[in-house]
Image: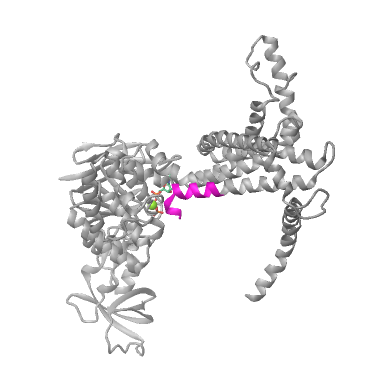
Amino acid sequence: MSFLTIEKIKKSFNNETVLHHLNLSIKEGEFVTLLGPSGCGKSTLLRTIAGLIHPDEGTIHIDGKNVTEVKPKDRQVGMVFQSYALFPNMTVQENIEFGLKMKKLDKESIKQNVARVIELVELTGKERSYPRELSGGQQQRVALARSLVTQPKVLLLDEPLSALDAQIRKNLQKQLRSIQQELNMTTILVTHDQEEAMAVSDYIYIMNKGHIAQSGSPHEIYTRPASEFVARFIGNYNVLSRKEISNLFNDDNGYTRDIYAIRPEAFSEAPVKDGYEITGKIQKMTMLGNITRYELEVNNVCFIADHLHKIEEDSQKRETITLYLNRKDVISLT
Amino acid sequence: MKRMNGMLLISIIPFIIFVLLFLFVPLFFMLYSSFQENGGTGFTFSQYMEVFRNTYYHQAFKNSMLISFFSSLIAITLAVFAAYSITLFSKKVQDRILVFANLTANFAGIPLAFAFIVILGNSGLFTLLFKHFGWDLLNSFNLYSWSGLVLIYVYFQLPLAVMLIYPVYQGIQAQWKEAAALLGASPSQFWLKIGVPIIMPSIAGTFSILFANAMGAYASAFALTGSAYNLVTIRIGAITTGDIFARPELGSAIATLLGLTMVLALLINEWLTRRIRRDLS
Ligand SMILES: Nc1ncnc2c1ncn2[C@@H]1O[C@H](COP(=O)(O)OP(=O)(O)OP(=O)(O)O)[C@@H](O)[C@H]1O
Ligand SMILES: [Mg+2]
């Protein structure tokens, strides 16, 4: 049963179509990510859901109600902006209680609700600080608390973590996910970081130039990219043409599509049944933490292969390496 | 790095000399001479005593402060709305309006007074025109009075205020408005709780500048009313040029007090701002 339904949403700016009749359907309590490169229309879609942008065509339903013509404040959506958009003249406490005051809640329930979310986002003790006295991560949590406290039906997050450094970002991703699960909050996250999307989402929509390029669970998207764009965007996929594939395997049986993808970690050093055996020249070897990445060349085809790093690695001296690949790991793309 | 600093210092020397010659030297001489007997013959407080005793000077200060306060208040109130409406135009139109504001802000002093006399004076264009049509709109208005003076002051204060306040609105992030709207605030609630408190320090700062600008204005008032209207700057002008005989020491004492008034206004302003915006302290 879909909780948030977006049907045939179209939006243009100055005769340039930014959203091309998009359809999305999101279940209650689901954590959905809109993933795509800069300028593909992620923010525009999110702002359309919030009601900050009016679509040219299409409808938006939240919890069974058509909200396409409903004002932002009556849609019961919360939004966290990339720039946090905290009110600089208000303390943490005042920022968080703003939404409840606008709803004219009584003093006692305001106090209780605010105290609860402050605890939830772990900002206890910062109630009287002003935004400029907080770190980026703390400001982001205030922004989150400010949206959560009004108990929205849908929480929208527009690249909430992209301004933070890697360490804090990882921590906040976890925190965000656990808060979302604790509250069973229907959440849409916008990001252009595919790792972030994979780490937190139940479901991912990959966007490209105002279209949905592919949607599915993180696992589906990662293991079965549908197009060259997705394969290139979500990881280090080897994207190879039909000619390159037949050169690589010395076999053109059954390869009729134009383009294929192979995950770098699909190559193994142990023989696989009914697989290919490939002996390649090592062009370059890079350590990526627990992974060793080989850049290899076979019959003028270059590709990369990843291996879990082993202590007794001696390939520095080796010039070639023999790898094995299962046929089903050669993914055809459109 | 050291070398850079040396070069910087050298390049800043002309500026320092300029500031010394045209700011500190005159300031120093003004202070020095305000404590001198007539003719500069010895140290005394008598110039200040005279200013404090003479009700004529009290009145000058009162008039100056009143006209400065009211013209600044009117100008800033209008400018807050005017500058906001400017931000709603396209960038091109905004730039044009600002150029115009810049021009009019510099249109002050004798030419301005003359322009007003030509238009609204006793035999001004509009005065005669309205008389001709039998309209008595301007009958109760006298350009050479307090209201005429306020009009002229507002005229040169308003564009300055618009130019100073206009950039302030650029500091209001669109996302604050959006965040407030999503949290259930109406536009007027946004301005009341967030917009105005955020721009308040800048408005107060602009008010200080306008107040000082008006307190120091001389030529427009002098051209319009001669020395008939009792303002501090007109008093200083009269005393230092001397209708009967010049008394630069007394003029210096009044000028020093005028300066102190502006500093005081600035401090009050600062204090008020800090009370309103606790997050800035
Ligand atoms: N208000 C607007 N007026 C005109 N064009 C706009 C407006 N908002 C967005 N656009 C255009 O729409 C396209 C999509 O913008 P959008 O902000 O949705 O991208 P995005 O996917 O969020 O990118 P990013 O990752 O950089 O934030 C861009 O080409 C942008 O220039
Ligand atoms: Mg964006």
Q: Where is residue B50 in the image (x, y as percent from the top left)?
A: 72, 43
Q: Quadrant of the N terminus of chain A?
A: top left
Write the start and end of the magenta stretch as one range.
B267-281
Indicate the quadrant where residue B28 lies.
Answer: bottom right
**Secondary structure, magenta segment, majority class:** helix
Residue farthest top in this picture: B134
Residue B25 horizontal side relative to residue A139, left or right: right
Q: In front: B95, or B206?
A: B206
Queried whether the magenta region covers residue B120, the answer comes back as no
Does residue B273 appear in this view?
A: yes
Q: Quadrant of the C terminus of chain A?
A: bottom left
Residue positioned 45% across, 54% down in the render: B280
Q: In front: B191, or B54?
A: B54
Indicate the quadrant where residue A304 lies.
Answer: bottom left
Please determine whether, in this image, residue B9 is positioned above or below residue B257: below
Queried whether the magenta region covers residue B272, the answer comes back as yes
Q: In front: B255, or A64?
A: B255
Q: Where is residue A153 in the image (x, y as percent from the top left)?
A: 22, 45
In this rendering, the count of numbered labels is 0
